[in-house]
Amino acid sequence: MPDHPKVETPPRSQLGSRPLLGIVLMTLSLFLLTLGDAATKWLGQSFPIGQVVCLRGVFILLPIAVVTWRTGGLASLRVNNPKDISLRAVLFIGTATLISTSMILLPLADAAAILFAGPLFITALAPWMLGEVVGWRRWSAVTTGFVGVVIMLRPTPNALQLLALFPLAAALCSAFRDIITRKISATESTNAIMFWSTISLIAAGSLTALFGWKMPTLSEFGLFAITGVIAGSANYMMIESYRAAEASVVSPFKYTAILWAVALGYVIWGDTPDAFILIGSVLVIGSGLYILYRETRR
């Protein structure tokens, strides 16, 4: 998947009771994000990764600008904690770059499956970074999930699928990003977090122009635009899905990204996941769902 900003669940008073709408929005959001992944993979075969990340970020700003205009204007972009916003931006850049690299180098389904190690990392890091208590049941789920990750890495006495370390690093980077987001969400608006992170991504990506960019054709430029708008719109849909229904109802449907990735990977590139990916993804997804279940019981 492309970089998914951490979505803060709205206060319970703002939550609706429209579970079907929430599920539809979440599923459509993940389809669009995975479609954006496929476009990123396609573009990455012809353009430098820095150019892909930068131009995609430019067009992500369009839906962010629309939402900002509708929900507070420029005042909502004010920053109260520049240090943490900057740290979050660095992690956002790292996550976006690693995810895009993963999508380009690996089959779509393989990268998507390993990226779902992110929630496992968050649970494992929460006691030290957020002071949260993690019981033995969730630690068992984390351990089981990482067994699934190891299976997907295909370790043998002679080799390790080194390319699979890219999505694993992306999952770890995204976990740090989401933990920082959780810490600053009380003082910073969603508009400010998304806007300044995206601006930082564009600035960092533009520096790679020094190493040579390729001029896109009109159709390629259009694909860059579509990819960015899709990513920004999909994240807005994800936020709205949490407003329509409880997180415990819609969050499990994030895992439909695996299905979309398998389908698009097969249709476009003829890729099919092997037994390592299938077994590992079952363990990772199962662990993630169990952790979500335990979270809702607390």
Image (spheres, rainbow, N blue to C red):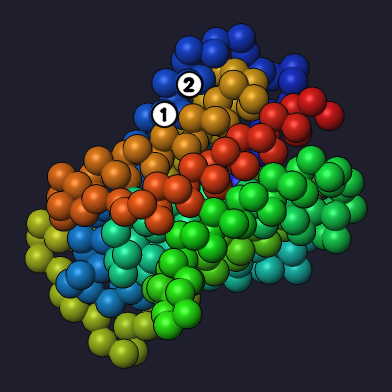
Residue at the bottom extreme of this rendering: 211
- Give above or below for 7 relative to 126: above
Q: Is residue 98 visible?
A: no
Q: Which mark is residue 27?
A: 1
Query: Is disc 1 surrounded by few (<14), some (14 to 19) or many (20+) residues within 10 Å?
Result: many
Q: Label 1 amino acid?
A: Thr
Which label was assigned to residue 258?
Answer: none
Q: Residue furthest front?
A: 157
Q: Residue at x 48, y 71 (%)?
A: 155
Residue 77, image x, y percentages: 63, 50
The answer to whether the residue labelled 2 contacts the one labelled 1, judged by CB atoms less than 8 Å apart, is yes
In space, the residues marked 2 and 1 are separated at their CA atoms by 6 Å
Tag 1's secondary structure?
Answer: helix
* Nearer to us in this view, 296 or 96: 296
* Residue ID at (36%, 52%): 275
Q: Quadrant of the C terminus?
A: top right
Residue 180, position in %: x, y?
A: 72, 57
Q: Position of residue 192 (x, y in %)?
A: 62, 51
Which structural element holds mark 2?
Answer: helix
Quadrant of the image occupied by residue 202: bottom left
Image coordinates for residue 53, horizontal then vertical, percent: 37, 66
Q: In front: 165, or 80? A: 165
Check disc 2 and report the residue beneath it: 23
* On screen, residue 136 above or below 204: above
Q: In this orientation, which residue lies closer to the viewer: 61 or 140?
A: 140
Q: Is residue 211 left or right of residue 2?
A: left
Q: Dot 2 surroundings within 10 Å: few (below 14), some, or many (20 or more)?
A: many
